[in-house]
C-alpha cells in the first residue's frame, strides 16, 4: 500500500520584528494514494533565522476504512514533521511538512484536523561577502564617449583619420596623450552575484604614438589589444588551449574618451639577451561552434550542426 500524501502548511507573516508568535491552521485532509511534494524556493543571505519551538495538533480517531487505500501497517506511531522557510515578495513563508495520519500507543488511527506552531525569529549578524566598494557614479555619466565594437581577439589601431571619419571632433583633442580607453572585454559577467566584480568600466592600457609635433593630427594613433566574445584559456593539465563563448554576445565594446591626462600605457620591454630568430611556424587557435538549437528551449546549452547519419560535413579554416 502507498503511504499517505504529505500536507504542506504555508504560513505567511510580514516582518521579523516579533520575538515569538503562534499560528494555527485547520487542515482539510483528502485521502490520496500517492505522495505529494512541492518545490520551495530559498533566498540566501537572510538576516534572520526562524525556529519552531512547539508544534501541537488537534486529532480525531478514524478507522481503516476512513483512510483507504492507505494501510494502517504503513503509518508511523507518532506525528512526524519538518519545516522549511524563505522570503517571498518581502514576506516570510514557512512550509510545514507532515503526515496527516498516524497511530497512537494503543494502535488507534489518528487524523490531524488542525495544527498549531509557535515560531521564534532570531536576529543574526549579516553575512559579510567581502570588502566590495561601488562607484559613486558611472564614468559614462560625464564627458564625451565613443564606442568601438570588437569581435575577434587581436591588436587594433585607432588613428586620426578613422576617428575623424567616424564623426569625432578631432579638433577637441589637443594631444594623443589625452585619449583613454575603457572596457571589460568580451568576458561574461559571473553567474553569482556574490563574486566581487568591478561595477564600472576599468581602464585598459594602450600604446599612444605621436608624429612628433605635439598635436593630435595626421600620423597620430593608438594601439590596443582587444578581446572579443570568446575567451581562450590554457589548460595546464592537457597542455592545450580551450575556448569559452560568451553566450549572450560575440561582440565586445571599447569606450574611448579624451580631455584627460593619460595613465595606463603599454610598456615596451626589451629582452636581456636580444637575438635574431627566423620564425617559420607559429601556434594559432581556431574553433567551430555554431550555436543554433536549444533542445529544451530554455537554459544556456545550445547545440549546432545537426548530423543525419551517414552525413558528413567539412569545415575549413584560414590561418
Image (cartoon, rainbow, N blue to C red):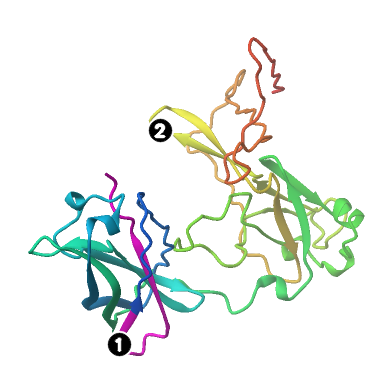
Q: Are marks 1 and 2 in contact (CB under 8 Å)?
A: no
Magenta includes 6?
Answer: yes
Query: In the picture provided, is 205 more to the left or to the right than 318?
Result: left
Secondary structure under the numbered disc 2 in the rendered image: loop
Dot label at residue 293: none
**Residue positioned most to the top:** 310
Give the residue at x 77% y 58%: 147
**Residue positioned most to the left:** 106
Disc 1: CA contacts within 10 A as few (<14), some (14-19) or many (>=20):
few
Quadrant into which the N terminus falls: top left
How far is the residue under mark 1 from the one under mark 2?
57 Å
Q: Is residue 23 visible?
A: yes
Secondary structure under the numbered disc 1 in the rendered image: strand
Residue depth check, mark 1 versus mark 2: number of the one nearer the observer: 1
Q: Position of residue 67 (x, y in %)?
A: 28, 57
Q: Nearer the viewer, residue 159 or 234?
A: 234
Quadrant hosting residue 83 = bottom left
Give the residue at x 14% y 63%: 108
Quadrant hosting residue 85 = bottom left
Magenta includes 282?
Answer: no
Query: In the picture provided, is 51 more to the left or to the right than 212?
Result: left
Q: Position of residue 258 (x, y in %)?
A: 76, 67
Give the residue at x 49% y 63%: 193
**Mark toward the start of the polypeptide (1 vs 2):** 1
- 208 is higher (above) or lower (below) than 196: above
Query: In the picture provided, is 304 more to the left or to the right than 82?
Result: right
Which residue position is annotated with label 1?
21
- 90 is higher (above) or lower (below) than 168: below
Q: Magenta residues, as a range? A: 1-24
Q: Is residue 130 visible?
A: no
Which residue position is annotated with label 2?
236
Amino acid at each position: 500500500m502507498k503511504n499517505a500524501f504529505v500536507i504542506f502548511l504555508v504560513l505567511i507573516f510580514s516582518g521579523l520584528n516579533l520575538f515569538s508568535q503562534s499560528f494555527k491552521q485547520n487542515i482539510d485532509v483528502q485521502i490520496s494514494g500517492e505522495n505529494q511534494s512541492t518545490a520551495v524556493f530559498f533566498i540566501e543571505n537572510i538576516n534572520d533565522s526562524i525556529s519552531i519551538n512547539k508544534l501541537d495538533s488537534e486529532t480525531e480517531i478514524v478507522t481503516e476504512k476512513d483512510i483507504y487505500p492507505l494501510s494502517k501497517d504503513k503509518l508511523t506511531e507518532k506525528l512526524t514533521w519538518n519545516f522549511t522557510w524563505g522570503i517571498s515578495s518581502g514576506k516570510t513563508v514557512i512550509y510545514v511538512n507532515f503526515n496527516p495520519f498516524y497511530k497512537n500507543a494503543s494502535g488507534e488511527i489518528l487524523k490531524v484536523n488542525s495544527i498549531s506552531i509557535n515560531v521564534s525569529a532570531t536576529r543574526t549578524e549579516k553575512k559579510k561577502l567581502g570588502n566590495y566598494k561601488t562607484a559613486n557614479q558611472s564614468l559614462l555619466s560625464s564627458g564625451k564617449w565613443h564606442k568601438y565594437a570588437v569581435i575577434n581577439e587581436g591588436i587594433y589601431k585607432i588613428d586620426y583619420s578613422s576617428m575623424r571619419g567616424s564623426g569625432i571632433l578631432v579638433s577637441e583633442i589637443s594631444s594623443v596623450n589625452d585619449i583613454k580607453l575603457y572596457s571589460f572585454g568580451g568576458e561574461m559577467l559571473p553567474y553569482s552575484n556574490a563574486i566581487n566584480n568591478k561595477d564600472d568600466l576599468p581602464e585598459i592600457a594602450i600604446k599612444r604614438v605621436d608624429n612628433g609635433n605635439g598635436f593630435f593630427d595626421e600620423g597620430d594613433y593608438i594601439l590596443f589589444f582587444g578581446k572579443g566574445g570568446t575567451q581562450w584559456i590554457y589548460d595546464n593539465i592537457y597542455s592545450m588551449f580551450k575556448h569559452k563563448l560568451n553566450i549572450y554576445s560575440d561582440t565586445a565594446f571599447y569606450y574611448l574618451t579624451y580631455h584627460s591626462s593619460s595613465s595606463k600605457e603599454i610598456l615596451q620591454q626589451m629582452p636581456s639577451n636580444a637575438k635574431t630568430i627566423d620564425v617559420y611556424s607559429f601556434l594559432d587557435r581556431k574553433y567551430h561552434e555554431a550555436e543554433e538549437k536549444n533542445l529544451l528551449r530554455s537554459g544556456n546549452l545550445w547545440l549546432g550542426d545537426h548530423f543525419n547519419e551517414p552525413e558528413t560535413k567539412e569545415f575549413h579554416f584560414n590561418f
